[in-house]
Image: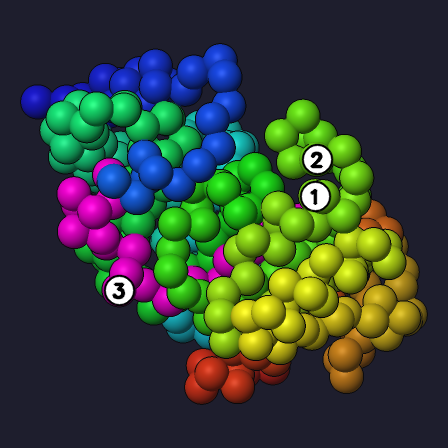
Amino acid sequence: MMTYKDAVSYIGACNGTVVELGLERISGLLSRMGNPQNGLRFVHITGTNGKGSVAAFLRSVLTESGLRTGSFNSPSLININDTVCIDGVPIENADFAEITAYIRSIAEKMPDLPSGFELETALAFEYFKRKKCDIVVLEAGLGGRLDATNVISENLFSVITGISLDHTAFLGKTAAEIAFEKSGIIKRGSPVISGKADADALAVIQKRAKELDSQLVRVDFGEISDVSYSLGGTVFSAHGYSGLRLSLLGGFQPENALIALHCVDLLRKYGYSIPDSCVF
């Protein structure tokens, strides 16, 4: 029987020193597991900066609205459990160990052993399926196009929080090249929300959205006004709301929150009931 400590050690041991992007291993693993991701509804988020904050804001709003909300993010903040949460509560040790043991029994029969991040991704999908999540806020790990989270075949919509130079050894040397990798999460017929991007990066996102008949929603950060800071956090107005309050400080946090508000708009169009009282 695999213990929680064994499970953490096993996943850690599968994290090699070389980053190997690609969807072959994760696709093979999930196929052998019965593709647990196929029954889930995703909001898929990538971006150079802000994706963690946008995901956290959106998760909070959805949970407050009474939706069973799964979330997957990396890296962990305290321990590996907090990468996989439902309604903000990390997966329990017993579930982590049991599902890891199940995945290990499948993964070790594969000719090419999945990486630790691929195992975590598979664990998250299996956990969310078992717990019957209404919606999953899915944060890409590295880039987008070849990130393990992009194994999903469809999503409600995609979010690209912003584009600037990051992980250039893997994603490209220019903003346009990085935008190509991150815009790889856009799915045919599903909208994409775009935050800050220079002209070259935006052109790449626009081209990809057009190719996939995806509605492009551009966030206008000029909407933000009446920003003030205190020990209690940040207060601002935007998008028809006034006096929105965030516990986090930082001039960029209202921008991240505005992206999340655009996510709320799209989810309401999909029929999700999100009362104004649950928005921040």
Question: Quick one: SS at disc 1?
Answer: helix
Residue 73 in sight: yes
Quadrant assignment for the N terminus: top left
Tell whether position 30 is magenta: yes
- Mark number, residue 172: 2
In the image, what residue occupies the spot 39% across and 41% down? 23
Q: Which residues are magenta?
A: 29-50
- Mark number, residue 39: 3
Q: Quadrant of residue 229?
A: bottom right
Choose the circle earlier in sequence order: 1 or 2: 2
Q: CA distance from mark 1 to mark 2?
A: 5 Å
Return the residue nearer the eye: 5 or 156: 156
| Three-letter code for the amino acid on which mark 1 is drawn | Ile
Label 2, residues with CA under 10 Å away: few <14, some 14-19, many ≥20: some
Residue 92 in sight: no
Tell whether position 41 is magenta: yes
State if disc 1 and disc 3 touch (CB < 8 Å).
no
| Three-letter code for the amino acid on which mark 3 is drawn | Gly
Return the residue nearer the eye: 278 or 77: 77
Choose the circle earlier in sequence order: 2 or 3: 3
Residue 224: x and y in percent read 86, 70
Return the residue nearer the eye: 207 or 99: 207
- Residue under circle 1? 178
- Circle 3 or circle 1, nearest the eye: 1
Choose the circle earlier in sequence order: 3 or 1: 3
